[in-house]
Amino acid sequence: MNHFIGHLHTVLIHKKEVYILCKKCGIPMQGICHDLSKFSFQEFLPGVKYWTGNASPQVGERKDLGYSEAWLHHKGRNKHHFEYWTDYVEGKGVCAIQMPNKWFVEMVCDRIAACKVYLGDKYTDSSALEYYYKARSNYLINEKTAYDLETVLKFLALNGEDKTAIYLKENYINNK
């Protein structure tokens, strides 16, 4: 029961943080609808089983199975993940596609919120950038999307959340 409550609490706190950020960026409905697939059996049950409170349950599922069924389900249904934006291109194989702006902004909000939830008191405005730097060599991400993400995360590290939300709203939402 502790894992059930813990996972549910983590998901709800994360959703709340994403909503707050999405609202600041001018996309409140995306904040409301964010990660609804986490309540599906395919994602929620592994989330409960592998919940630790300090890392994504997908980490535990990957250690156990060698991959994460919950993640495969999640990324295929949520356009705010750059992993969603891949497709097979004849003669090139699997390619990363540039993310549309509204999903890009939600992705940034998601990354900030995840860092806040998992790092707690250790969170700083540089946390999402530091996480990006640690993981980016493993990403299959569109070049423009990667450039924009790094640019926005650097902006966040230097200017804080409120100015970053204004920057995202002005440059990615209002200036489509």
Image (cartoon, rainbow, N blue to C red):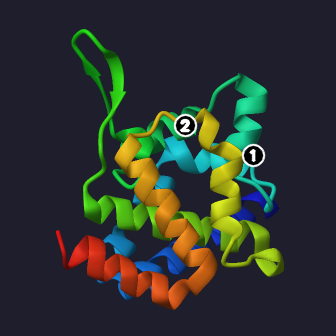
Give the image location of residue 64, x and y in percent: 77, 28
Asked if the residue at tag 1 contacts the one at tag 2, i.e. Cβ–Cβ closer than 8 Å, the answer is no
Give me the residue at 37% from left, 40% from top.
84
Q: Can residue 160 be seen in this view?
A: no
> Which one is nearer the viewer's eye here, 126 or 55?
126
Q: Say which residue label 1 marks.
A: 50
Give the image location of residue 172, x and y in percent: 28, 71
**Which picture quadrant has residue 30?**
bottom left
Q: Say which residue label 2 marks.
A: 139
Is residue 91 shown left or right of residue 144? left
> Which one is nearer the viewer's eye here, 14 or 147?
147
Q: How many numbered dots are placed on residues in this image? A: 2
Give me the residue at 47% from left, 89% from top.
163
Q: What element carries label 1?
A: loop
Quadrant for the C terminus in the image: bottom left
**Which picture quadrant has residue 123?**
bottom right
Mark 2 residue type: Tyr
